[in-house]
Amino acid sequence: MLLLAATAVMLTACSGKDKQADNEKQLDAQEKSRVVETTTVTEQPVSDELELNGEVACDEQLLRKVFIPCTGRVSGVSHVVGDYVQAGTLLGVVHSEQAADYHKGLADADAELRMANREYQMQRDMRASGMASDKDVEAARSRVTMAQAERSRLATVAHIEGLGGRANALLRAPISGYITATNIFNDSYVSEDTNNEPAFEIADLRRVWVIADVYESDISKIHTGDPVVVTTVAYQGRKFIGRVDKINNVLDPDSRTMKIRVTLDNPHGLLKPGMFATAHIMTQHLGTRLCCVPTESVIFENGHNYVVVAEGSKYVRRAIQVAHNSSTYTWVSAGLHPNESVVSKNALLLFNHAS
C-alpha cells in the first residue's frame, strides 16, 4: 500500500510538472507572438533586384523658402535647423528703414482715402443744395475709388511681404514643417548685397524623395513606376515602400551614373533629409507569377526552407519550395497559396513552437 501511494504521488507530481511545463511553453509562445508581424501572400511576377545607394531628400513640392523682403537688422530668431514649426509661426523680425518708408506710404494712403471720402460727401451735399454739379460729384467719387485701390494694393503687398510692424518686416512660416536651412541670425544686418539666399527653408516631410545613382550598365533595367523598397541604416529591418518617380536623362561624365528619384510616403516623419538609403528595385520581370513573401519570412533548416503560417490563433510550420529569391523578396513554387498569412518579422521566435 505504501508503495502504491508513493507511486501515485510521484505520478501526480510528474503530471503537475508536465502541465506546468506545457503552460510555460504556451505562455512563452504567446509572448513571442506579440513581437511578430504577418504578411499576406500575394502572386507577383518573378523579378530580379537591383540595389542602389542613395540619400533622402525633401520633396520640393512640399518645400517652402522664406525670403527677407527688405534690408535691415535681424532680431527675434529663436528657431534652428531641425525644429518643427506650425504655419504662421514668427521666425524672425527685420527692423528696416525700407519697411518704415513703406508703412509711411500706407499711412499716407489711409489719409488720402479719408480726405477723398470727406470730399465726396461734401460734393453730394452741395449738389443737393444746388451748389455742385453731377460732374463734380463724379470726380469726387473717382478720387475715392482710386484711393481705395491704392490702399488695397499696399495692404496686399504688406501681407505678401510680411510687413507687419511700423518699421518691421515679420518673417512667418508659410507652412507647417521642419526647418531644413537657415541663413540669418540675431543682430546680423541684411543688405542688398547679402540678401540673395532664403532666410529659412521649411519642409513638410509627409512625403520625401530618395535620390539614387544608377550605373550606366543598369540604366536599361529601370523604368518609371517600378516598385521600390527603401531601407536605411537608421531603421534596421524596417522597409519603406515607394516607386520610381523620375529618371534623369543626363549621365555624370565622371562617375558614369545617372540619378533617379523615388517618391515615398513618410507619414510619421521617420525619414529625414540627408539620411543614407538603399533602394531595392524589382527589375527584369520574367513573366511567371508565383506566390511572393518577404525573404526574412523564410527559414532554412536541415537542407529545407520553411515559413511559419498563421492559421487563426495558431502558427503552423510549413515546408516550401523556393523558385527565386532576392535580398527583399522570395518567390515560392510550392507550399503556399495566395491570401495566406505568413510571419514576416521574428519568424524564428515562433518556428520551434509551431506545429
Image: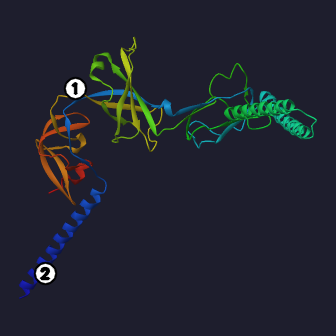
Query: Residue 134: image x %, image y %?
Result: 85, 32
The disc placed on residue 89 is none
Label count reads 2
> Which residue bears the numbered disc 1?
284
Query: Residue 91: image x %, image y %?
Result: 66, 38
Compared with 29, 66 (above or below) is above
The residue shown at (39%, 19%) is 248
Horizontal placement of 160 versus 108: left or right?
Answer: left
- The 10 Å Cα crowd at callout 2, few under 14, some 14 to 19, many 20 or more, is few
Horizontal placement of 247 versus 193: left or right?
Answer: left
> Which residue bears the numbered disc 2?
9
Q: Nearer the viewer, residue 117 or 97?
A: 117
Q: Secondary structure at mark 1?
A: loop
Query: Residue 350: image x %, image y %?
Result: 22, 54
- Say which quadrant the C terminus sits in: bottom left
Q: Nearer the viewer, mark 2 or mark 1?
A: 1
Q: Secondary structure at mark 2?
A: helix
Q: Give the residue type at disc 1.
A: Gln
Question: Does the image show residue 97?
Answer: yes
Compared with 254, 122 (above or below) is below
* Farthest residue, direction front: 130
Q: Which picture quadrant has residue 264?
A: top left
- The 10 Å Cα crowd at callout 1, few under 14, some 14 to 19, many 20 or more, is some
Q: Mark 1 or mark 2, which is nearer the start of the sequence?
A: 2
* Farthest residue, direction top: 253
Q: Which picture quadrant has residue 161?
A: top right
What is the C-alpha distance between the residues marked 2 and 1? 68 Å
Q: Give the residue type at disc 2.
A: Val
- Here the colouring is rainbow
Query: Residue 321: image x %, image y %?
Result: 11, 40
Answer yes or no: do the residues labelled 2 and 1 have beta carbons within 8 Å?
Answer: no
